Image (spheres, rainbow, N blue to C red):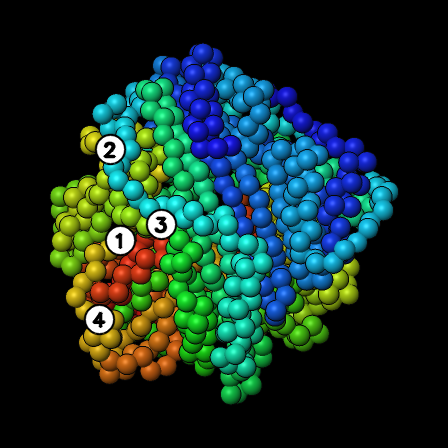
Amino acid sequence: MLPYKDHFDVDEGTTQKIFSFALSRGGSFCDLFFEHTILNQITMEEGIVKQGELVIAHGMGIRVVKGEGTGYAYTEETTFEKMKEAALTASAISEGKSNVGPVALAGVSFVNRYPIGEPTTGTPLKRKIAWIEDAERAAREFDPRIVKVSVSIADDLSAVQIATSDGRILRDMRPMLRFVVNVVAEMNGNRQVGTSSGGGRIGNEYFTTRMSPAEHGREAARQAILLLGAIDAPAGPMELILSHAESGVLLHETVGHPLEADFIRKGTSAYTNRIGHRVASDLVTVIDNGTIPNDRGSINFDDEGTVTSSTILIEKGILRGFMHDRISAALFAVPPTGNGRRESYKHPPAPRMTVTYLANGESDPEEILRSTRRGIFCKSFRGGEVDISNGDFVFVPVEAYLVENGRIEAPVKNLTIIGNGPDVLSKVTMVGNDLQISDGRWTCGKGQHVPVGVGLPTIKISEITVGGSEIGP
Amino acid sequence: MTTNEMKRFAERTVRRTLAAGAETSEVTVLERMEFSAEVRKGSIEKLIESVSSTIDIELSIDRRKALVSSSDLSEESVAALIAEGVELARIMDRDEFFALPDADELGTAEGDLDLFDPEAQSIPTERKIALALELERNALSLDRRIIPDGSSFSNGSKTISFANSLGFCETYRRTSHTLALSCAVEDKPENGENIGKRQSSYWYSTAIRARDLERIEEIASKAVSRTLRKIGARKPKTCEAPVVLDPETTRDFLESIAGALGGGSIYRKSSFLVDRMGTRIGSPLVTIVDDALMPGKLGSRPFDFEGVRSRRNVPIEGGILRSYLLSSYQGRKLGFKTTGNAGGVSNLYLEPGASTPREILSSVSQGLYLTALSGPGANWMTGDFSQGAQGFWIENGEPSYPVDEFTIASSFPAMLSGIVMVGNDLDWRSAIAAPTIKIERMTLSGT
């Protein structure tokens, strides 16, 4: 283990001086974001532990805000001279002159959302390798048609310190565990892939309390073997049932992104000026909640020092609020929601989701299935994408089935599902009582990569366009 | 660091890695300068400027491999990093295929690749901001309905030094400049439903040299017309139809092909091109070139990520699969020599054909002109293809109305065989370059 820097060698006096350089040209606010991250990864491929990796990211970023404008600079050398230089660079967002006296810094209290049983970072490599081997063996033994298996375990630990010119200082240690199994199944030239992954801001107890390495191995193998027997998906509009947990991807794309307030303040989102309006069926209540214990998308406070909370975005179909960073919150004169997030010290924060989910409804998931005449039932996903301005979104299922007269029939492959956000949310006709948050595997790529969570109860959408290749009669 | 200091640092780190117990060592030192100014509604939205460095060390002991990297280049930190790497390598399994490239493959391509604009660092910040502002002003003056969504000027430089324990040590620099504009417009359907809908689009120009950027007037007018032309888009019928892909969407398609050609995907059996070497995989019009030696192009490089001398490869020639894109490790696994593709493609392009884009559109009586693809549904591992789409419905050879909220589906083998026309309009704004193409038939899923 490398000596871990759990604090940054910057005293209050230095911080105050850097603030005064950063605000010397009239910026209205500034913050200093320090980060020291250690990432460990081990990968097994073709039956051998092929590569060990260690990545260290160390640096600090300075942001100066003036109105809606941001000046940003960062440095990897956290010396006074380099930080002063970065502060002066970032100060250029404003063109005036200003003398800022010393700001007294005080800590902010927050609840730790990621209590850890046994930290993964620092666990002996032999133990990590044993987990990888368990998963590999389980995948291989699942079926002789599994021809390739790769498994990796990655853990990172990020020490973060934020000091703001309105006098707050916050420190956090952010852990993250991610376990991934990828397999290829082969039969008569037909080749399919299967994936299972999970984790979160959690320690080794993940494997005993949530999902074991062997279960991940079997799950990836099951998926690939299932897809060997899948038929090409149909094309055209039909009913859609989304199974709970992973299908939250739908929500992330349809309303999540368009309700991030940077798109709202710029007027490019389809939900601009729509607060108080009906934007979905009355069965739809959408929440973004960064406080879910040990979730991949949770954070104790966001990357500009706002303590994380839970925000109701849509309540029974009515638009109630947006996800804000400090800049948009100031502009809309509302409190920041704790959604100002960044990928690393190299990036200024922007409004981003944490854990986004749909509140429970009253329907029995079985009844939702039984009520479907002809449609598609989706269980897991590769991901999605949305066009913020026209509201069109796509998402791509991995495990999906045809449904005929209330019964699950053949698995289908090669399909993208497309819809228009406001239109599809008005067609949510049933919401189940089985809300579940997906295992921690999602990363959102809006300009910067940040880990997020999604969740959903089983729901039914009365009509959506299924983009397969087979045109029916 | 100066380039000479970087080179010496890389070389010294190789020696230190060996002294710490490693048998092979490869060290990459990267220094990156980035600048970006984004403006919106006449004010600066974001101003970012920084210099950053990283070091990557790949080392092995008895063919057991570890990779360590850090943004902290201080002596004591690098020493600790090396010690970690050595400890990590010892616990890995032996990979009999792992070795450094053959010594005679190492080297730097001859001649000047023209990757560096000496003027990049001397453009004053005020000038960069002024360019972004001028681009936005220009766009807003074209149509009063335009909602600005950011106009930016960004540039940067990278210095890459690479050294290995076979004695190779070289360095090169590259610059890039980009002017980009995004905008939106309100799109109110006549029936009044779905209030709030907007359409958006963008245009950008990227070049190694600032003076090679497209003119501001051109970028503004393309971004604006690409946005306005989407107003009133409707959902097309579910059908099979010929599809004309514009250079941007052909580029997306090529990017997937590049993934499928990669040696890593092949030995992992995660590519639809596995077991297809030497066979016909596309129409005779399909020739795909990966050429690292083109002067002034964004993907050019004198050597690849493991120091192998750059070259020109033709992985697909007249529809026949001739080679994969390989690093030395991937080559050894598959029984071939390296193609100089450690780190991926260089400049990968579909060789342009004879037809103008207009001629290609004219050849379609009813069909789709595809201008945008979305979502992760291009699965080159299995060959499946189904993606979200936007574009125009073609009637009698002319794009007649915009279409959106539909998908197109087929498979990579069927699409490659179905390419019946290739345009002459190769677009070089990125390292993967493509012209307009026409695919005989794909499935559209809409109403």
Q: Are marks 1 and 2 on the same chain?
A: yes
B53 or B250: nearer the eye?
Answer: B53
Q: Are marks 3 and 4 on the same chain?
A: yes
Q: Which residue is mark 3?
A: B298
**Mark earlier in primary sequence (2, 4):** 2
**Mark earlier in primary sequence (3, 1):** 3
Q: CA distance from mark 1 to mark 2?
A: 20 Å
Q: CA distance from mark 4 to mark 1?
A: 17 Å
Q: CA distance from mark 2 to mark 4?
A: 36 Å
Q: In the rendering, which numbered label is found on residue B338?
A: 2
Tag count: 4
**Residue B249: in sight, yes or no?**
yes
**Mark earlier in primary sequence (2, 3):** 3
Rate crowding at label 3 as few (under 14), some (14 to 19) or many (20 or more) other CA atoms within 10 Å: many
**Mark earlier in primary sequence (3, 4):** 3
Q: Which amino acid lies under the numbered mark 1 shown in the image of this protein?
A: Tyr
Residue B63: quarter of image = top left
Residue B328 percent location from the top left of the image? 27, 30
* SS class, disc 2: loop
Residue B267 percent location from the top left of the image? 28, 35
Q: Which residue is mark 4?
A: B356
- Residue that appears at 72% across and 38% down: A161
